[in-house]
Amino acid sequence: MPNWCDTTLHICAPKPMLDELEDFLNTENKDMPWFKGEQFRSGGVWIYDILKLYGVSEEKERQGRSEMDGYCDRGYLVSYDRYDDCNLCIYFDTAWGPCTQFTDFLRDKLADFCEKEGTDPDTYGYGVSWKAEEDGNVVYEKDDPLGVFPEEWIFSFWPEGDIVGDGDTEYCESDDEMCEVLASFLEDNGVDTKGFGKDIDKLTAEAAKVFNKYEVCYTLERFRSI
């Protein structure tokens, strides 16, 4: 069984394209109690189902898989949010890491749709962004032309033993913000940070020492932009 990667896909596209996609998701899941965040793992929409919506036959998918490691259909839908007419966010669990070829496939379909409609995607800011998080393989990546994922750092830990802090996941949008979070954490755990300033390397190294001291599992990673 793979490590499941939390992948968030944000699509900004013309209303008719998102209407078609949302109608498909609802139809495919009409008997599934997964709305409002209830997760499902079987019987719902897999990435391959969305490929079929856009005309990828099983034969073509197999051919694509052999030619370019597939359309990366190794994942299933957890939930989605329709924010407005032109913005839809889909949450996937994908095996091991993000399905980047699937994202490229959607971008191609968006371009095709806009061309048929005579719409300039740049004028309206249409596009597709994704963010992926997977602890086991230390995958923290994003490809964000839409600018909808501002986070640059992720920080969390298991609050075990004598370590101070609740360990809740924190996302930081800059090095300075991450430095403030780390300085606060270190001070709470008895480390004098006056000489560290805003040196992100020194602060992350010192935090690692604290976690090693208490033998606590933690995540402290910068998102890699693809």
Image (cartoon, helix red, strand yellow):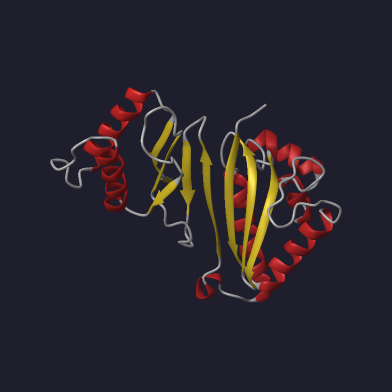
For residue 48, above or below residue 87: above
Q: How many marks?
A: 0
Residue 101 drawn at (x, y percent)? 60, 45
For residue 160, above or below residue 185: above
Residue 71 drawn at (x, y percent)? 66, 43
Figure quadrant of residue 115:
bottom right
For residue 130, above or below residue 193: below
Left or right of 187? Residue 171 is: right
Q: In this view, which residue lies farthest toward the front? A: 162
Q: In front: 161, or 124?
A: 161
Residue in the image at 30% along x and 29% along y = 210
Residue in the image at 43% along x and 40% along y = 167
For residue 86, above or below residue 38: below
Q: In front: 41, or 164?
A: 164
Residue in the image at 42% along x and 50% along y = 171
Residue in the image at 78% along x and 64% along y = 23
Residue 114 drawn at (x, y percent)? 63, 70
Q: In this view, which residue lies farthest toward the right? A: 31
Left or right of 119? Residue 73 is: right
Q: Quadrant of the N terminus?
A: top right
Left or right of 104? Residue 181 is: left
Q: In front: 219, or 82?
A: 219
Figure quadrant of residue 13:
bottom right
